[in-house]
Image (spheres, rainbow, N blue to C red):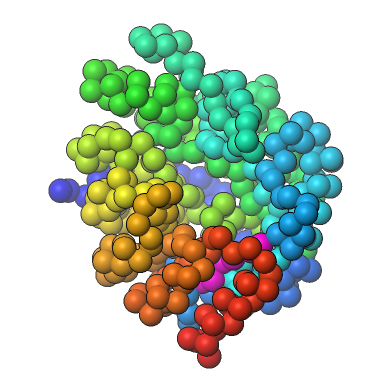
Amino acid sequence: MTTPTVNSSLHPIPDISRWARALQDVASEPLEFLSDFPVIAQRHEAWWHQAADRPLFLAEVNAEPSRPITRRLNLLERPDDWFDVKFTDLKKTYRVGDTLPNIRADFGAVLMGGLLGGDREESADTSWTVHFLDDDWSNAPDWSTIREDNVWLQTMRAALLRAAADAPGRYLVCTPDIGSSGDTLITLRGSTNLCLDILDRPDDVRTAVDGLYFAWRQAFMELYQCTVDQGAGMFHFFGLWSNQPYTLQACDLNALISPQHFQEIFLPDVARQAATAGRAFFHLDGPRAAIHIDALLEVEELQAIQFTPGAGTPSALAWIDMFRKIQAAGKSVLVICPGDEVLDLCVALDPSALGILVEGVSSPAELDDLYTEFRRLYP
């Protein structure tokens, strides 16, 4: 296996350095909702360098279960109403450890499909793009451009700007799931059809991946222009702070395709997007995706790997050897796990390059008890 090369059409973003300085300024001051933010931001930053003083502990719970906290998708077209409810959600959320207070502009899965002109449907507190790409790909959109009159661009921009107007000095802004090239194509074509296209019309897929880099770059810049340029601190949706811009890379499609196709068609673009942002981690979703770990570890542009064991699969503890391999390769790891696996993970792995995102905790008291046990490991 050879290390993937970054596509030669890499287009740097001139604003990266300026955004980094702005983020560092944000990280140097307390927040109204997190008075020790400078200390916590420093720990997050050290995690990127495999140099944290202890594992990141990310966990929160709804402090008022009688009032469910949802994505609030039904309010996105009314930014002021959306913001009012999201701000109440922020106040009703109980956080411990290194968890960051935030308002997230949440649009459900892979918004890029909508940004390229697809219709979006909503159900059960999530949303998705309706497949519209024909079998012959004759109605493919302009992969490289998000139109200024796109309704989802305007809606995303309005939500981010509304949150960013209130956030400075108080809390942070969390981004929507934009989506990388492979997952964007799934939303437009459907997973079965796209897998067949990779076999039958790989040139069309490669053309789309190459063009989508420019649409992704446009959306990435929009995120920072609508938040950091307004004085707000911003991070992506697994809860990791960084003193410089970064991108969350993903390709859930890789669970359905061969290592050869992943490495030839999609992995170079993962590296290209990561290099454009300057810092990146990769979302590895489930056991079937884990077959690609060796290829991902060879991508120098990725500083970390996030792993989700997946519903109905063995626990995170079954993947200790893979986590050790990630850390041995000089990359940090972020693991999603239930509370009863936290301490075992801490004992088994290098704490300086470990982040734990806890799920399944039902009350503030339960969360406090777990965090107390965790802190006993790191007095």
Instruction: Give the left or right position of residue 246, taking residue 64 as reference.
Output: left
In the rendered picture of this protein, how many numbered marks are placed on residues? 0
Whether residue 24 is visible to the viewer of this picture, yes or no, is no
Instruction: Give the left or right position of residue 71, taking residue 117 as reference.
Output: right
Q: Residue at x 50, y 54 (%)?
A: 246
Q: Residue at x 59, y 55 (%)?
A: 235
Identify the magenta region.
Answer: 56-61
Which percent across, then down, holds residue 134? 42, 11
Q: In the figure, 226 relative to 56: above or below? A: above
Q: Residue at x 54, y 71 (%)?
A: 57
Query: Which of the 4 image quadrants contains residue 10?
Result: top left
Q: Residue furthest left?
A: 1
Query: Which of the 4 image quadrants contains residue 294?
Result: bottom left
Whether residue 68 is visible to the viewer of this picture, yes or no, is yes
Magenta span main SS: strand
Which percent across, then down, holds residue 216? 49, 36
